[in-house]
Amino acid sequence: MATLILLPGLAGDARMWRAQVDGLAFYAPVVTDVHARHDSIPEMAAALLQEHPGPLVLVGASMGGMVAMEAARQGGDRVLGLALLGTDPNPESAEMRALREAAIELFAQGRAAEVIEPNVGLAFHPDHARDPVLVRAYLDFVLGAGAEALIRQNRAVIARPDAREHLPWLRCPVLVMCGEADQLTPLARSEEILGLCQSARLIVVPGCGHMLTMESPQLVNAALGEWLESVISA
C-alpha cells in the first residue's frame, strides 16, 4: 500500500492537518516536516523521497503543494497520486518577491506579528477570519515557527522551480482543490494546474479561503477520501 504524505504550507505543521489525520485515519497519513529542515523546494522534495521509500500519494497545501509537485517530478512513477490544495505552479512574480523580501526584513527584526496578524484576512474567508478559535490556531503555529523558519521558507518559495514545465508529463491522477475566496493562491492558479495536467480534476470549495484544511475540514476530507479510494485501489 502506498504511503500517504501530508505536506503543510509555509510555517505550518501537523496542526493544520489535524482534521485530515483523524478523518483519513484508515490510510495512516504521515505529516512531513521536510519544509522545516531544508533550504529549498528541490531539497525538501528530495528529502521527502529519501525518507519515505516506496510508492507515495502526496497531498500538499500551499507551499506544501509546491514541494509535492517537485517531488512528483523527482520521484516519477513512485508518486501514484497528487492532491494540490491552494497552491501555485508558477515561479515567483516580481511583485510577490518584493512583498516577501519586505516581510523577511521585518521577520529579521523580530516583528513577525506585524506581518502575520494582518495576513489573517488574506488567509481565511471573511466568515472564518472572525472565528477567534480558528484564527488563534493559525497564529499559534505560524508565529510559533519562529523568525528563522519564516525567513528560510519564504526564501525557498521565492526561488521555487517553475512547475509548469513538468506538470504536463505527469501520468498520475491529480486532484486540485481551491477555496472560492482564496486571495493568496486565487482560483486561476488551480485552473492553470488543471489545464496542465493530463489526469486532473478541480474542486472549488464554497465559503472557503486559503486554509482549506482548517476552514472546510469535512468537505476536504470527503473529497480526499473519495479520491484516495480510487487512487490507492487502482
Image (cartoon, rainbow, N blue to C red):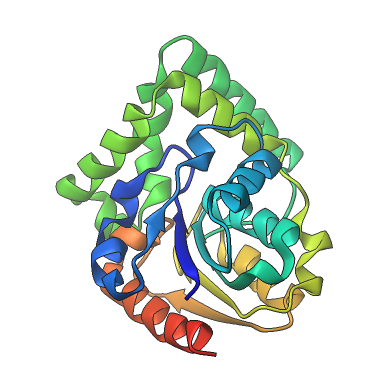
Q: In which quarter of the image is the C terminus?
A: bottom right
Q: Is residue 211 visible?
A: no
Quick one: 62 or 5, which is closer to the camera? 5
Residue 39 x/y as whole percent: 62, 30
The tally of labels here is 0
Give above or below for 141 relative to 177: above
Quick one: 1 or 122, which is closer to the camera? 1
Q: Is residue 48 left or right of residue 95?
A: left
Residue at coordinates 33% horizontally, 74% vertically from top-left? 221
Quick one: 213 or 123, which is closer to the camera? 213
Residue at coordinates 67% horizontally, 29% vertically from top-left? 98
Residue at coordinates 74% horizontally, 60% vertically from top-left? 73
Q: Can residue 81 be seen in this view?
A: yes
Q: Is residue 112 left or right of residue 90?
A: left
Residue at coordinates 57% horizontally, 58% vertically from top-left? 53
Hey, which residue is sitting farthest left in the picture?
A: 133
Give above or below for 123 relative to 101: below
Give above or below for 159 relative to 28: above
Residue 141 x/y as whole percent: 31, 37
Give above or below for 83 relative to 172: above
Residue 17 x/y as whole percent: 33, 56
Residue 128 x/y as whole percent: 26, 56
Quarter of the figure with residue 20? bottom left
